[in-house]
Amino acid sequence: MSKSDETKQRIIKASVRLFADKGYSPVTMKDICEATGLSRGGLYRYYKSTAEIMEAILESEQKGADEVAACIYELKWTAMEMLDGFLSSQKRFIESDVVSIETAAIQFSQLEAGRQTNIKRFSRTVLRLADLIRQGQAEGVFAKGNADIIAAHVILVIGGLRQQCALIGFNQTFIDKQFELIRNIIVQGFEEE
């Protein structure tokens, strides 16, 4: 990894912590300079605004998820194994101490750039999950139904759970039950009107 890439990673890591702790709006470039030890010029060499940094954070999160999905497909996991892996990764994020980055992402989405970034984030996640659901349906292990609608529903539920855990928190039993219900929707189906 180049020195430039290492610096970007340092900026992202420090910014994630700041956004998770304070939310998006209160964090300034000065805060990020202090957290990273970079001069203002040093920071601006990589990012021109907190919006650019937040976009990079969300893109990095999505890229990581895309890379994990690609590795899983290469390993030729069954749809059930992929579903369990996907749900486990979502649950680990909710249980992590950076789940509060969701609050910052919501604040960021009030800006047009943030709105567009979050639309892409949502769309890519729904697309990936819908493909997985179609695979499970083809394998005969997931309930029949419109994979795109099911995936969108599941991602909306997980998104709401991430937001509420960031805002108010829930105990482990509650979180486990929600993920059990999400899995059941995909595997056993639900009534469509």
Image: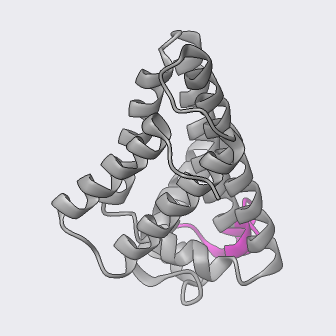
Horizontally, is 145 left or right of 189 in the view? Answer: right
Identify the image quadrant of residue 44.
bottom right
Residue 136 versus residue 83: which sits nearer the camera? 136
Horizontally, is 103 left or right of 112 in the view? Answer: left
Tell me if residue 49 is in the magenta stretch: yes
Identify the image quadrant of residue 5.
top right
Q: Position of residue 8 (x, y in %)?
A: 61, 52
Q: Position of residue 38 (x, y in %)?
A: 56, 67
Count every numbered label the image shows and give the total. Answer: 0
Image: 72 above or below 155: above
Q: Residue at 61% across / 53% down in the picture?
A: 192
Residue 164 versus residue 137: which sits nearer the camera? 137
Q: Position of residue 29 (x, y in %)?
A: 62, 79
Tell me if residue 119 is in the magenta stretch: no
Q: Position of residue 148 (x, y in %)?
A: 71, 44
One can see residue 169 in this view: yes
Q: Which residues are magenta?
A: 35-52
